[in-house]
């Protein structure tokens, strides 16, 4: 049996929370949340991630089947103890689909968290993110008292926001509003300055979409299963995703670098930032998942990494 990866076990502190996370956070979202893979595959992926050393998992109430699959994976494993993993989930400010609301609907949010716990069969969440709020929602004190209440009750260990908006992240850093920020950061969309500010403020940083949705990879156009069609449609489905697509395609040269796995190099770029606690990525094949974890131990030529950093 080949040696298990070691780099994944070098846990990093999630800001000032006292929580230690694996440098890769397995994202149970996107294709993982849909019928593009079977429940059985989803469970197998979760278990394999854990066996490979991933101890940080991210999901969300509005992510289709994802929480239910996480719950099934936890239930089906005699190996995974609740305390041995860090589990993050998200709630929307208002009903699902109202993620960009400006104010918290307290009853809605309470019910959402209760449903998350029940669906996953757990009694606490390590990190609870408010899901892509409108920046104005940060003016709503009820949001922060909601988190405080949940923390007092022991239902939540750390508060956070999941956002694509650097302004939201920077305000959290400036005013120390929350414990953790998940912000998209990858080869194509870089947030180094914001990440440094968050780190300096003691806010834990999770780099979201760490593989830039795989949009720089040549494989993007190799369509063999339903999931691949969905990825292609997602790439063109909104203005934001088209923008990411065009930014990411500038990194197609990664596919041509000799002796380098393009996805591993892209991931190394994110993990090379010492202020990032964990890189959130999704991989819905065992091969991809294994290679992602192995990236931590892979020897990536420095010149390739420098080329990515400078481009
Ligand atoms: N605000 C934010 O920062 C934010 C927002 C949304 C989500 N997130 C988090 O970020 C996570 C990841 O986001 P995402 O799924 O949109 O994008 P991603 O992880 O950047 O990219 C996923 C894509 O990369 C492919 N892939 C993974 N490993 C690979 C490998 N070794 N070689 C080739 N291709 C590989 C996957 O294909 P296969 O599926 O075929 O393996 C999939 O197409 C989410 O699950 C969530 O936790 C953060």
Image (spheres, rainbow, N blue to C red):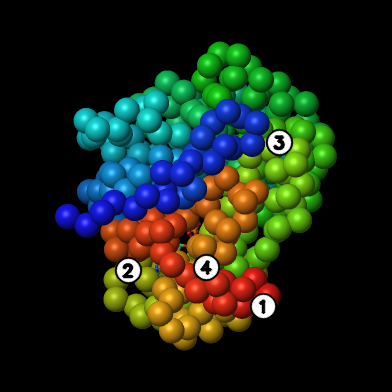
Residue 21 drawn above or below residue 33: above
Check disc 4 and report its element: helix, strand or loop.
helix
Q: CA distance from mark 1 to mark 3?
A: 29 Å
- Residue 233 in view (yes/no): no
Which residue lies under the disc numbered 1? Answer: 311
Horizontally, residue 184 falls left or right of residue 12, namely: right
Residue 239 drawn above or below residue 8: below
- Crowding at dot 3, Cα within 10 Å, few <14 / some 14-19 / many 20+, comes out as some
**Residue 235 x, y percent position in the rendering:** 52, 71
Labels 2 and 1 touching (C-beta < 8 A): no
- Crowding at dot 1, Cα within 10 Å, few <14 / some 14-19 / many 20+, comes out as few
Disc number placed over residue 202 in the picture, else none: 3
Is 281 in front, or is 308? 308
Q: Residue furthest left?
A: 1
Q: Identify the image quadrant of the C terminus.
A: bottom right
Residue drawn where x is 67% and y is 54% of the image:
164
Work out whether mark 4 precedes mark 2 in sequence or the reverse, and give the earlier one.
2
């Amino acid at each position: 049996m080949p040696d298990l990866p070691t780099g994944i076990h070098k846990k990093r502190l999630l800001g000032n929370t006292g929580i230690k996370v694996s440098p890769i956070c397995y994202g149970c979202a996107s294709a993982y949340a849909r019928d593009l893979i079977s429940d059985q595959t989803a469970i197998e992926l979760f278990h394999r991630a854990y066996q490979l050393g991933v101890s940080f998992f991210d999901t969300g109430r509005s992510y289709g089947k994802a929480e239910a699959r996480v719950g099934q994976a936890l239930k089906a494993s005699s190996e995974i103890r609740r305390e041995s993993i860090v589990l993050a989930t998200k709630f929307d400010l208002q009903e699902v689909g109202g993620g960009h609301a400006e104010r918290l609907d307290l009853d809605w949010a309470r019910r959402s968290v209760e449903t998350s716990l029940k669906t996953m069969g757990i009694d606490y969440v390590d990190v609870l993110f408010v899901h892509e709020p409108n920046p104005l929602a940060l003016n709503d004190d009820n949001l922060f008292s909601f988190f405080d209440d949940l923390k007092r009750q022991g239902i939540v260990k750390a508060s956070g926001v999941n956002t694509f908006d650097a302004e939201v992240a920077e305000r959290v850093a400036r005013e120390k509003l929350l414990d953790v920020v998940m912000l998209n950061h990858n080869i194509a969309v870089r947030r180094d300055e914001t990440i440094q500010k968050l780190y300096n403020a003691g806010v834990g940083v999770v780099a979201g979409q760490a593989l830039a949705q795989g949009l720089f990879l040549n494989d993007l156009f190799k369509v063999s299963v339903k999931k691949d069609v969905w990825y292609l449609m997602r790439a063109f489905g909104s203005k934001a995703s088209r923008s990411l697509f065009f930014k990411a395609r500038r990194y197609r040269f990664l596919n041509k670098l000799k002796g380098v796995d393009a996805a591993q190099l892209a991931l190394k770029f994110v993990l090379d930032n010492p202020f990032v606690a964990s890189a959130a990525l999704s991989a819905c094949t065992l091969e991809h998942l294994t290679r992602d974890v192995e990236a931590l131990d892979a020897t990536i030529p420095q010149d390739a990494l420098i080329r990515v950093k400078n481009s």
